[in-house]
């Protein structure tokens, strides 16, 4: 089930991502953000994890309130994500699409127990950090999630044009 699409938004976001990266601007992607970043760099997505990935046993479109975590993710040691959250995090899950084939210049830094990719980062620099969950809905109840917002501000300051 693909759901509603709006091609002008897709084309705009793909062009925006490419322009930001070409200008050396850091990006933090959330949910659709991890998916569109991945597509912009040549990857693809499961259009519907439930039907296209039968091994996915977690209910990724959670029915719990948005701030409520519903599953864990395992995080790669030494990644930017691990510096923010450690080796494991309890996250919310509000998606039915997910990264399938990883795009060029990206590496997987978090996965759900069912194998769904939950975190991506750039391999050659610190420009991209993206997660499948919604820290913007969680940080007030789970303060460790606020670190993402401090991180993007710090990366933006480090990359600002002189």
Image (cartoon, rainbow, N blue to C red):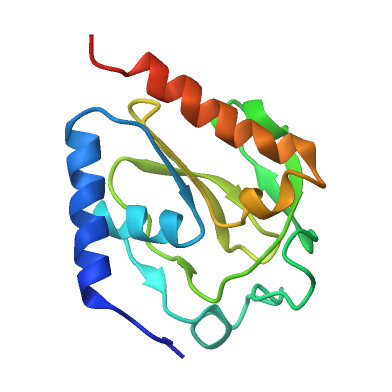
Give x and y (percent) for residue 12. Answer: 21, 60
Q: Is 130 placed left or right of 160 in the picture?
A: right
Q: Is residue 92 above or below residue 50?
A: above
Left or right of 82 on screen, residue 25: left
Residue 42 seen from this side: no
- Residue 60 location (% of width, % of height): 65, 72
Q: Residue at x 58, y 63 (%)?
A: 116
Which residue is at a point 70% across and 34% down the rendered structure image? 85
- 138 left or right, relative to 98: right
Please state which of residues 137 and 22 is positioned toward the viewer in this rendering: 137
Q: What is the residue that sits farthest to the top in this orientation?
A: 162
Q: Is residue 75 above or below residue 10?
A: above
In the rendered image, the vertical position of residue 46 relative to residue 159, given as above or below: below
Quadrant where the C terminus sits is top left
Name the residue at 33% across, 27% down. 124
Measured as percent of width and height from the top left, residue 130 is found at 48, 46
Along the line of sight, which residue is nearer the eye, 85 or 103?
85
Which quadrant holds residue 20? top left
Q: How many marks?
A: 0
The residue that appears at 55% across and 57% down in the rendered structure is 132
Decide if residue 95 is in sight here: yes
**Residue placed furthest toward the front:** 140
The percent position of residue 102, horizontal first and vertical second, equals 37, 55
Toward which corner of the image does residue 128 lie, by quadrant?
top left
User: Where on the picture, by quarter, is residue 142?
Assistant: top right
Left-right relation of 22 to 88: left
């Amino acid at each position: 089930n693909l759901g509603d699409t709006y091609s002008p938004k897709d084309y705009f976001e793909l062009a925006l991502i490419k322009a930001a990266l070409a200008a050396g601007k850091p990006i933090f992607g959330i949910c659709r953000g991890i998916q569109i970043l991945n597509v912009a760099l040549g990857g693809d997505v499961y259009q519907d994890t439930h039907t296209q990935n039968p091994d996915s046993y977690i209910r990724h479109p959670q029915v719990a309130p948005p701030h409520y975590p519903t599953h864990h993710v395992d995080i790669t040691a030494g990644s930017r994500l691990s510096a923010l959250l450690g080796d494991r995090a309890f996250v919310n899950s509000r998606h039915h699409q997910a990264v399938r084939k990883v795009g060029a210049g990206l590496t997987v830094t978090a996965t759900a127990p069912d194998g769904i990719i939950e975190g991506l980062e750039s391999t050659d620099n610190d420009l991209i950090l993206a997660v499948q969950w919604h820290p913007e809905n969680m940080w007030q109840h789970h303060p460790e999630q606020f670190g993402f917002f401090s991180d993007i501000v710090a990366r933006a300051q480090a990359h600002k044009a002189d």
